[in-house]
Amino acid sequence: MAAYVIVDSKINNLEGMQEYIEKVGATLGAHGGKPIVAGTNIEVVEGDWKPSRMVVVAFPSMDAAKAWYNSPAYQEILPIRTANTDDKVILVEGM
């Protein structure tokens, strides 16, 4: 069953994020990850939610999503993202 990594991202330092942006794509392929949403054109129609940028990455399974997140390649660049953003990240299984 497919799974998704969903990120509600607020980038505080775009310059500081450049290395992460350049490297994150290469970490996805080994785990079957495919970005399907990355954008700032967001319209909230219900609730008190104020996302500024949303990213959704599809994986073939929850195990694959977790393997990507916990992989040495991703863990190596994760501190770059966390130092330069205020993000909320979830992994969710699809239908």
Image (tube, rainbow, N blue to C red):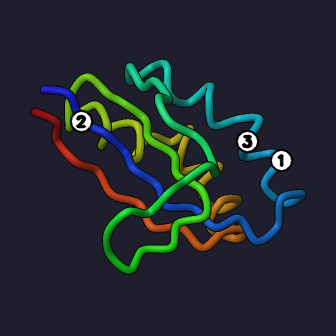
Q: Residue at x 31, y 39 (%)?
A: 4
Numbered label attached to residue 21: 3
Q: Is residue 57 above or below residue 90?
A: above
Circle 1/circle 3 CB separation < 8 Å: yes
Q: Position of residue 65 (x, y in %)?
A: 31, 37
In the foreground, 50 or 60: 50
Circle 1/circle 2 CB separation < 8 Å: no
Q: Quadrant of residue 2?
A: top left
Q: Tell me the element at label 2.
A: strand
Q: Is residue 60 left or right of residue 34?
A: left
Neighbourhood count class around disc 3 (C-alpha, 10 Å): few under 14, some 14–19, many 20 upward:
some
Q: Is residue 74 left or right of residue 11?
A: left
Q: Is residue 51 above or below residue 40?
A: below
Numbered label attached to residue 3: 2
Q: Quadrant of residue 27?
A: top right
Q: Position of residue 14 (x, y in %)?
A: 83, 59
- In the rendered structure, which disc, 1 or 2, sits on the residue that comes first in sequence? 2
Q: Residue at x 53, y 67 (%)?
A: 87
Q: The disc labelled 3 sits on which kind of residue?
A: Ile
Neighbourhood count class around disc 2 (C-alpha, 10 Å): few under 14, some 14–19, many 20 upward:
many
Q: CA distance from mark 1 to mark 2?
A: 27 Å
Q: CA distance from mark 3 to mark 2?
A: 22 Å
Circle 3/circle 2 CB separation < 8 Å: no
Q: Is residue 29 above or below residue 52?
A: above
